Image (cartoon, helix red, strand yellow):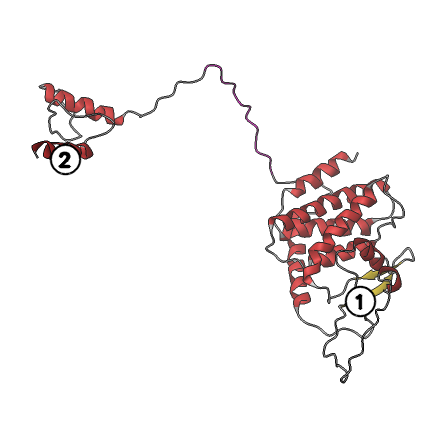
Amino acid sequence: MNNLKRKRNQVDDSDDEELSFGRQILPVANLPDTFDGIPSDGMEYLFTVRRDARLLPHVARVPNPYQAKNPIIPPRSLETTHPSLPSPEWRSLFEIRFRNLRKNIAQPTDSTASSSKLRIPDLKNRSAWWDFLAGKPESVWNPPKKPKALKQKKFGRGMRAFNDDVGLIYNVASTHEGDIVSQPAEGLLPRMALHLLMYFTYWINQHLTKDRQPPFPRLTRAHLQWVFTLLTRVDDYISADDMNLLRNLTRTCIALLKVIIYAGEDNADDQAACWMIISVVIGIWGQRDLWMDAEEMLKSIR
């Protein structure tokens, strides 16, 4: 019984001991931590030793004599100074007006009499969408399917209450080159915007590729109008994958802008359209680092 009490007392005492300094065997003076006098006996000396030991680090590290010094790279400034870039005042005003445009588009309006309500291609059919944007008839991008034989019911006839056809309000206009190109209108479905922007990124890349597969029609200003209108349908807060999609679109427009500038023709409107798309993505979704990509593109043009 006495052995059990002795073991229990040893366990209880071990909880109060300081693990870092071991078991206290010798007597230690009970002095305040501010004691700075000369120890008069061994107990006071042990107190000063244990007090100073608590202030020492538990782990010490010596400098590595073979460690190579990393070069100090100055942080890259986000401020751009190229004279051909849009001015900060223009960017701020353009961002305000674009936000107001999105608010106006979000309000429901009646379709005009000049608009046509036609079916649109399947969202996953990229080639059909290109034909649709090129103003081709519905028989091209939505060829009629073979009719299926319907079984007549024996009792009565059914009545359809809803129209299953998906419609989109769009306008058809002629470009300065004489091509008929579909133009976006207010009835554009928001869920289609990002998917179609992904298509436009692909089409612009194909336009910039020299060995693109024919037949591939050329891009027109109306296509850039589509991109601009699609951006008005994208929400302020999007996922990381969708943000990466917009960044790829912006870099593609920067590459397209470089080609347009190199052409040296009367294409000020095309340059302005590219700058508007670039400014929208950078300003609305806060991708300011892309201004540096645009600045580097301008510096590469000599």
Where are the magenta residues, as a range? 65-77
Tags 1 and 2 touching, CB below 8 Å = no
Q: Is residue 262 above or below residue 132?
A: above
- Assign the magenta stretch its main secondary structure: loop
- Name the residue located 67 percent from the left edge and 46 percent from the top edge: 247
Q: Amino acid at mark 2?
A: Arg
79, 237: nearer the viewer: 237
Left or right: 122, with 59 as reference point: right
Furthest toward the right, the residue is: 178
Residue where numbered disc 2 is placed: 8
| Visible residue check, residue 81 | no
216, 225: nearer the viewer: 216
Marks 1 and 2 sit apart, C-alpha to C-alpha, by 86 Å
Helix, strand or loop for disc 1: strand
Q: Count the numbered circles shown.
A: 2
Residue 68 counted in the magenta span: yes
Quarter of the figure that contains the C terminus: top right
Q: Position of residue 253 (x, y in %)?
A: 75, 46
Left or right: 18, with 166 as reference point: left
Residue where numbered disc 1 is placed: 119
Left or right: 268, with 58 as reference point: right
- Name the residue located 74 percent from the left edge and 44 percent from the top edge: 252
Does label 1 or label 2 sit earlier along the sequence?
2
Q: Is residue 99 above or below residue 279?
A: below
